[in-house]
Image (spheres, helix red, strand yellow):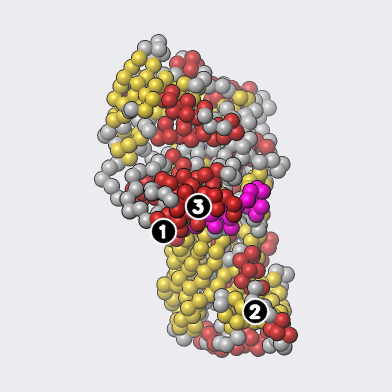
Amino acid sequence: MSNAFKRLRIGQVISTVVASGLFASAISAQSTNGYDRALELASFDTAWVRVRDSYYDATMRGLNWVGLRDSLRPFVEHGNSREDTRHAISTLLSRLGESHFGVLPGDAMDAGAAPTSDRAGDAGLELRFVDSALVITRVEAGTPAKTLGIHPGWVVEEIDTLRVLESLRATGKVATSARRFALVRLTLNLNGRLTGPAGGTVRLVLRDGTNARRELRVPLRETPGQVIEYGALPPMHVRFESQRLTSSAGCVGVIRFNIFMTPVMPQFEDAMSGMRDCSGVVLDLRGNLGGLGAMIMGMSGHFFATAETLGTMRLREATMRYVAMPVRVSRSGQPLQPYEGRVAIVVDEMSASTTEILAAALQRLGRARVFGSPSAGQALPALLTRLPNGDRLMYVIADFSGPGGSRIEGAGVIPDEPTTLSRRALLDGHDEALESALKWIESQRHHSRGPGH
Amino acid sequence: MNVFVRRLGWAAAALSLSFVTTDARAQALPDAKELIAKYGKAVGGDNWKAHKSARMKATMEMPGAGLRADIEAMNVFSTRAMLMKTDIPGIGSMMQGFDGTTAWSKDPTMGARLLQGAEGEQAAEEADPDASLRVSANIVKSETVEKTNMNNVDCYKVKHTWKSGRITHDCFSVTDGLIVATMMKQTGPMGELDVTQLLNEYKDFGGVKRASTTSFSMMGQDIKTTVTSWEWDTVKPEDMEPPADIKALLKKP
């Protein structure tokens, strides 16, 4: 066969499958069977070698990597459960002090991937910490939770048997430098507790708008969205919403999606096509934990007429750039031009990884204004691999910096117009971050570069 | 087909340099033309040239990441037209092609685009069926640079300089003349990657011998492709039709 088949652009395949997302991080351990110490040791060794050979900084941030192995491996040698192995590997990884490292329990991953008669369900609620209280920030329309009268601004004190305050106190014991990361994980885990088989229930103890105690059993609806299975990850629900709002500025589009996976792309294209006449578009990326990094190249191509560099991925032996790929045609072959109107992006502390990379790029290139609260600051390209004991290792393969060269990891995306979540505003029915974004677009109507002006 | 996959440069360096001996360097090296001719004979190059088109199906696996992709690639020799489709579950279909003049790409993350600059030149050069036998007019110079060991085989490394200026290397087995490894810079929208791939398990596909498996490792992931079928002269014009968005891009303004 011809040399033409060299054109399997492996680099592109690999860079496409590189995920920068925390969505896998919420998977919690289940009971493990079949403990085999030799396998556990092989797993520890594999993780140690894989990170040594793949981490972008060959100096391992100045750590004595061999010394760390020698000090932690005995915990596996003398361990008696898989948890001991996970703890040893997690401790090893934590020394690098970066996000996107982790050990994901294989049993939980496999359980997610296995065919099951249970349909995935959730309560249709979103939770965030507001002033040390876990507060409901979103109640989706049409859910049992909405029917039960649950309202944004209500405080969650207990989820099933878990007392939220006790969990929060535990993060207080975490070193200050890691507390932000721990809070993101905790919030992720607590939101994850509102999921389960559809038709099941979750017990919630709540404080309503008058601070009255309410104990409710909330039925779990079937989780909406397109289910996709990708590699070693359990099935994921991809959700996409878009709407056109009308204001004195004319129409404003609002787009929201929960994860960067490819089913979003055609929906995004269709939504943008329907918003060409709008004076502005809001990308509401709150709670979006990331996904396939390469998607930002196609997505940002809707906002740039030229191939702008969105950021740089520095691997150990190569440097690669994310570049905006300006759209020229629709999927059906119709001519298409990049959108010229105003772009606002809304983020919060649960906006992570690919979300942050996109938001930072558009912000720093002057193409978007960012609203909300600072993002998670967890934005490193990573890959997943199976360890000999069946667990999965998530490991960082590159450093990432946005336009201008500054890192997003640790710092996050700082909104141009910050909005602090307020329980009072939520109880009053306000979404202040989104309202700020819409107000800005409206204020720009006389200065708009958009086609509607 | 010669090459499906590639390996990062560091791996190439580790494999290619570690077994070089002083004695080997001191020996006279065979002329690159001889090595290329021996290779052409070993794989049945004359049989290759008797065909008009080829269709290859393969699988690509990244077991660590739990990924498996299906690949179908077609090449029409007279026009040099090429079309390759890689289906990755959970991601979708990645396509790339060359219509004899312009190279293009379409994938679920970046959308449809025409390949420009070095990326387009590389695609055009590789679409030439003669390039598979290393006798393409696009290769302006081939020279043997060393005897070494790659893929656990003693081999002669040959440096190819292409019209576009890019450089690639092949390592030809000392014993049977087959290519056991290739090295190149792969140009994509995100930049360049040094890729080395190891070729194994040569099999006869209708009178032409090709490597049925190739492997490489990148970013800690082992990647292997396996040819599952090979057909000669079954490619129809409609098989080479690009998708609607690419057709629109290819239209002259």
- Which residue appears at 38% of the width and 49% of the height? A80
Q: Is residue A280 visible?
A: no
Question: How many numbered discs, if any?
Answer: 3
Q: Three-letter amino acid code at disc 2?
A: Thr
Q: Which quadrant would the C terminus of chain B be assigned to in this image?
A: bottom right
Check if residue A64 falls in the magenta segment.
yes
Q: Give the numbered dot on residue A443.
A: none
B217 and B32: which is toward the camera: B217
Nearer-the-camera pick, A238 or A162:
A162
Marks 3 and 1 share the same chain: yes
Residue B225 location in percent, x, y?
48, 68
> Which residue is disc 3 drawn over?
A73
**Looking at the image, which residue is at 69% across and 84% down?**
B24
Image location (x, y in percent) of residue A277: 56, 34
Q: Name the residue nearer the viewer: B212 or B14.
A: B14
Q: Report, in whole angstroms, how far the alpha carbon at label 3 lies from the one at label 1.
A: 12 Å
Q: Which residue is mark 1?
A: A38
Magenta-colored span: A46-65
Q: Position of residue A303 (x, y in %)?
A: 61, 41
Q: Which amino acid does the dot numbered 3 rest on? A: Arg
Badge number at residue B148? 2
Q: Is residue A213 visible?
A: yes
Looking at this rendering, what residue extends furthest in the top direction?
A210
Distance (Cα) linking label 3 and label 2 = 38 Å
Count neighbours of disc 3 (C-alpha within 10 A) and say few if under 14, some if 14 to 19, many if 20 or more: many
Badge 2: chain ID? B
Secondary-structure class at tag 3: helix
Q: Main secondary structure of the magenta part?
A: helix
- Image-quadrant location for residue B129: bottom right
Residue nearer the viewer, A363 or A107: A107
How dense is the environment of label 2, judged by Cα within 10 Å: few (below 14), some, or many (20 and up)? many
Residue A7 located within the stretch drawn in magenta: no
